[in-house]
Image (spheres, rainbow, N blue to C red):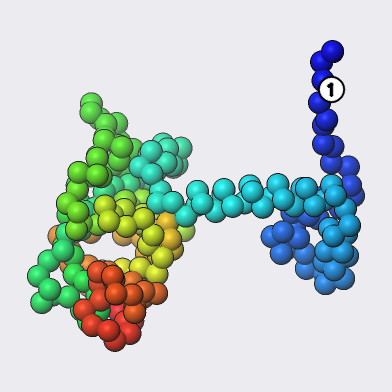
Amino acid sequence: MKKQETVFKRSCEYNSLVELLYLDQIQDEDERKRAQLHLQQCPECKRLFSELEVQYRYIEREIDKPVANKALDLAKKIGNKDTKYGLVVCEPVDSKKSLKNAAAYKTKVLFTANGVKSEKPKTLSDFKLGSLPQDSIAIRAMTDKSRNQLLLYLWSPQNENFDGWELKISGETGKATFGQSGVSQIPLMEIEDLNDKVIYFNERQSAFASGNRFIKSKSPIATL
């Protein structure tokens, strides 16, 4: 006789509030307290809450990973026809050009595309980032004209966590601050205009870390 499988059915009226409670999105204080009290007493909602913990931990791990070239190729493919993207490689230059607590890099645009058809179309996936010099930093850039921004996606042979990194482009105002996955943005500009520029990176949140490659002293990092 085939063993009957037990199917867990979600029927509790509080099911719809469990995810909001997990995400701390219940605005009404009394409703939040009722949901918390119910969660302590309801096995079904406890199980749902545990499932959400697993799902969101997985999502957070994925979000924190550097963005893959294939993902950017897909974003370009399904984006507007005038969306442009490209690859900019940054290599360290003479320390005399560095700012205090920030390392100087020279840029070189290796590739850009704006959707124009050609005999030999290129994508970011055509470039093997792992073959770049170990001390280089790659910037995958994509235009977002709807928000008047140039989106930046970092990649480095030596780093997977870019939390607290700051980028300053010589001759441009402002700076870009990156999260763990290396994503940020600057005001919209042509990707080709990033060619042959001196730019500066620092790691603001790691000012006292002994292994910080951008720190030249033990003093706190100054804002660029």
User: What's the amino acid at mark 1?
Assistant: Gln
Task: Tell me which corner region of the image, top left, top right, bottom left or bottom right, holds residue 129.
Answer: top left
Q: Quadrant of the N terminus?
A: top right
Numbered circles on residues, count? 1
Task: Tell me which corner region of the image, top left, top right, bottom left or bottom right, holds residue 101.
Answer: bottom left
Q: Residue furthest top?
A: 1
Mark 1 Cα shell of 10 Å, populated few (<14), some (14-19), many (≥20): few
Q: Quadrant of the C terminus?
A: bottom left
Q: Residue furthest front?
A: 1
Residue 41 located left or right of residue 64: right
Residue 159, percent from left and from top: 32, 57
At 62% from the left and 51% from the top, the residue drawn is 56
At 32% from the left and 47% from the top, the residue drawn is 85
Residue 120 located left or right of residue 20: left
Residue that numbered label 1 is attached to: 4
Q: Is residue 169 above or below residue 21?
A: below
Residue 191, percent from left and from top: 27, 54
Residue 81, percent from left and from top: 40, 40
Task: Tell me which corner region of the image, top left, top right, bottom left or bottom right, holds residue 97.
Answer: bottom left
Identify the element where label 1 is drawn: loop
Query: Which of 81/174 is in front?
Result: 174
Residue 59, percent from left and from top: 56, 49
At 69% from the left and 60% from the top, the residue drawn is 23
